[in-house]
Image: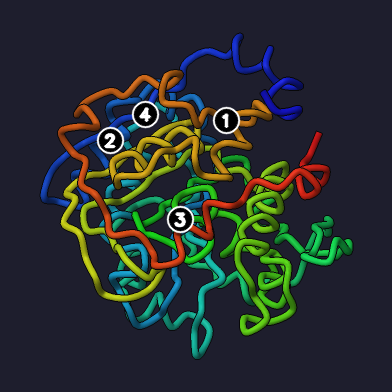
Amino acid sequence: MTTLETDFKEVIVMKTKSRVGLVKGASRRSNIYGSMELVRADIEAKVRDQVLLKPNFLSSENQLASTHADAMRGAIDFLLSVPNPPDEILIAEGGNEAYSGEAFDNFGYRALPDEYDVPIRLIDLNGETQWEETTIFTATRQERVVRMPKTVLDCPCTISVAVAKTHDVCVVTLAQKNLIMGTLQKEDRIWMHGFPSHPDRILPDEAQVLNVNLMRLSRFLKADIGLVDGTVGLQGNGPGGTDVVDLGAAAASADVFAVDAVMSKAMGFEPMQLGLLHYADALGMGVGDLEHIEVVGTPIEDVAQSFLPHETTQQQLKWRETEVEQYLPR
């Protein structure tokens, strides 16, 4: 047993099971709503007067790699069905765009405020003016400051609405990673990988650094509710591309790490072999171990399809490095 596992053994033994709603179907909107309905009590307990929905706009042009507006509709439908629905909904993202709001334009988000009685604000986080600072570390073990948006930090209920995709550093990219990487100050994001530019990135160093930095940021930017739309997922050399998998499923949980664990398994990956989920489980920040997760609704085996992994996955899986783990939050 490693030092990290020993230090947090008591947390692992004593923790209660997290619940994840898992639905199989053809309709993206119904899948999201249905997965939330399965764990209604857990989610209702976290809904507040203001709710922030965080889509994934990896691309402002490739809809397959970005959160569909119908996934948002499913989430909003559910939020308005609870006994104390929010007074305001924010849809906020710092996407990769040619101009501010391009993804909202291209993916049909502009229609959403007119479809509901509740006020809905579309926010481009790339235009954020108020930031809070924290530190990460680089591949050369240097400390570096990164900036987190006050819009997200101050919101009493954050919901990450991710797409089921394979990744080039973390094997998969799902709800918790989505909340962090799309909200940070844009110039700071590459440093989460430990390097100053994309051409400088090297595996497995990058995987070792990014997984630990994600845990450091999860102290502040942890989704209150995690949703993963796997109606149509992406496989292979993601997180972009067009190699689709018709998984026909969606998952929801009040434990963002648990929903990521269930969807990882549905995609054919072992959750506890993934750095982010292993660390979250060991540190008691969420549940990554399927033995401590109750799946409500469709069994994982009735949904599961083996996604083609990224060609660098074997290098990505070498995320474990003792020297790096000293930078984990304690």
User: Which amino acid is tagged 3?
Assistant: Val
Label 3: how many residues lie within 10 Å, few (<14), some (14-19) or many (20+)?
many
Task: Measure the C-alpha gap from mark 3 to mark 4.
Answer: 21 Å
Q: Which residue is mark 4?
A: 20
Q: Quadrant of the N terminus?
A: top right
Q: Is residue 210 above or below residue 58?
A: above
Q: Which residue is mark 2?
A: 35
Amino acid type, callout 2: Ser
Single out the mark in the foreground, 3 or 4.
3
Please give the name of the residue rendered at 32% of the width and 34% of the height, measured from the top-left corner.
36
Q: Residues within 10 Å of mark 4 (few under 14, many from 20)?
A: many
Q: Residue at x 66, y 55 (%)?
A: 208
Mark 1 or 2, nearer chain start: 2
What element does badge 1 sit on? Answer: loop
Residue 145 sits above or below residue 4 on the image: below
Alpha carbons under labels 4 and 2: distance apart: 8 Å
Q: Are marks 4 and 2 in contact (CB under 8 Å)?
A: no
Task: Name the secondary structure under disc 2.
Answer: helix
Q: Secondary structure at mark 3?
A: loop
State the separation of the CA atoms marked 1 and 2.
19 Å
The quarter of the picture where residue 157 lies is top right
Q: The disc labelled 4 sits on which kind of residue? A: Val
What amino acid is labelled 1 in the image?
Answer: Gly
Dot 4 lies on which element?
strand
Instruction: Return the x and y of residue 189 as percentages of the image width and height.
Output: 67, 70
**N-term-proximal mark, 3 vs 4:** 4
Q: Are marks 1 and 2 in contact (CB under 8 Å)?
A: no
Name the residue beneath numbered marker 3: 171
Front residue of 278 and 24: 278
Task: Identify the residue under disc 1.
Answer: 286
Front: mark 4 or 2: 4
In terms of sequence position, does the residue under pointer 1 or pointer 4 come before the other? 4
